[in-house]
Each structure stands twice: as structure tokens, then as C-alpha cells.
Image: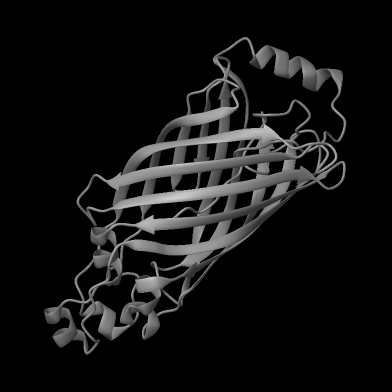
Amino acid sequence: MRLFRSGACVRSRRSTYPCSSKHCNLPSSGRGAATQGQEAAASDGLIQSGFFSLGVAALPEFEGSDELQGVPLIVSNVKFRNGMSLEVEGITSRLDLLADSFWRSGPIVNLTFGRNDDNVGSAALRALDDVDNALEVGAFVGVSMPLSPSVLPDGFFTADVSVRHDVLDAHDGLLAAAEAEFAFPMTQRLFFVLEFAATYASDNYMDAFFGVSSAGAAASGLAAFAPEAGVKDFGPAAIVSYALGERLGVFARVSYRRLIGDAADSPIVDVEGSPDQWFVGAGLSWRF
């Protein structure tokens, strides 16, 4: 599950703090000579620019849950002098290997939380087999381009497709995601990002998170269910960020994912959980 997309000065020299990991087009609140000098000094090293964000978030206890849990939220983006950038978005990390290019591509690593007695309150779900936390490794490719001034002045559009596979044999499945993002300034200090994403999951992933075996049905009282591969979710997200000064900013994010198809029809979701998956997060950002 992708928690957050937030970023730093990757595309625009006018940014003062992160708003989206793919964009940083927020107009500056007014940088002085000292700030520019610090940036010039930073560019002499390995790192050219970046940001670090720390906050709190609420998200489902497990995929399909109708209960939320609180977690710390860490988001960061570092742009290196060679043009590559490292994007850390909650539990997802990407390394864009293409230096300041129209294209984006590189490796992606994601942690997917499992389901066990520690995060399940339902007696029926506790009777099912646990699903361990999964580490998914893969690659992404996409494009990033400025929007026409007649459409959105200073706006940016990014679209990515990623594929990743579990390497810890937790669900032993494959996930493919498509994401699109529009980012643009609303005022001199206020920045807005609108996103949309959809995710495809393989048979193994669907069976691990949404399947109920005959033995599981007998133990839990839920109906046996054998889900098939397919698109499992889609939904929008919005990020608002505000510059408090040269380097300090605040941000908030709200996202909604709707489980669909066999994911929504599973008794784990339909009876014991919810197809409506919400994420809410907020925090502080520091640009360097």
C-alpha cells in the first residue's frame, strides 16, 4: 500500500518545501542571499537539495479493515548532483535513475503490512492463517512534464507504472500499479497535488489477503472464498502544503481507496471489514 507521495526540489528551483515526491513547484516565499548561498554550498557535495518530513498518519490496520491505526509518517526526497533522486514515501522508496529527464525510471521497494492477531480484533479473522509483512521489490517507469501555462501555470503532470514482487514469501504475489498526479501552486505559499491510482494484484496476493480456505471457513465461520487475479483497488488522493518560511512548511494528505472485484466480495472485507480504505496524515517539512 502506498502511503504517501511527497517531495522536494526536484523539478523547480522556486520550491521552498515538499508537497509531492514527484514535484516541488511551490513558489518561494522569498529566498534571501543566505539561503541561496547555502544551496550553492550544498551543491558542492553529493547532495544538491532535498527535504525531510515527519508527521503522523491514520490508516487501516490491514488491507480491508474497517478500523484505523495511528503510525508515524516519514517522507523524504533527496536530489543528487548527478540528477538522480531518492524518494521515500512512507513505506515505499524509489530511486529515479534518469537525471532531469522527461522519463522517470528505476527500482522501487515497498513494505506491505500483513494481518495477524496483533492488528485483528475480529475473532473470525483471528481464526484464519496469518499473513506476514511483505517486502516487495520491483521497478517503475513514467513521465514527468510541465503543464501548458494556459492549462495550469507552473503546474506539473507525472504518470508512473510500477511492478513489484514479494521477496519474503509472505504473499509471494505480484502487484502492478498505475498512478497519475497533477501538482500546481494555488498561491505564493500554498501548493496542491491531486492524484489518482489503481492497483492490479496476482492470484497469490489475492489469495493471501482475501481468500478463505475450506479449513479457514470451518474455523472462522466465514464462507470459503477463492479470489482471482485482477484490479483490486482504485481511488484519488489530495495533498495540501503550505510554506511557513524559507525552509519550514506543513502538509496534510487525504487519500481514499475503494476495494473492488474479488477484493470487495471477500467475506474478510464484505462481512468483517470494509471496502472503503482511508488514509489521513499531516506533519512538518524541512527543506535543505
Q: Is residue 137 above or below residue 230?
A: above
Q: Which residue occupies the extreme left position in the image?
A: 215
Q: Quadrant of the N terminus?
A: bottom left
Is 19 on the left-hand or right-hand side of 47? right
Is 173 on the left-hand or right-hand side of 5? left
- Residue depicted at x 29% and y 64%: 206
- Residue depicted at x 20% and y 82%: 224
- Residue 52 at what x, y percent from top left? 60, 38
- Residue 215 at what x, y percent from top left? 11, 80
Q: Is residue 213 above or below residue 90?
A: below
Q: Is residue 23 above or below residue 124?
A: above
- Residue depicted at x 53% and y 46%: 74
Please tell me which residue lies in front, 271 or 262. Answer: 262
Q: How many marks?
A: 0
Q: Which residue occupies the extreme bottom position in the image?
A: 221
Q: Quadrant of the C terminus?
A: top right
- Residue 110 at what x, y percent from top left? 39, 46
Please tell me which residue lies in front, 83 or 253. Answer: 83
- Describe the colour scheme in one phrase: one colour
Q: Which residue occupies the extreme top position in the image?
A: 44
- Residue depicted at x 36% and y 86%: 271
Is 54 on the left-hand or right-hand side of 168? right
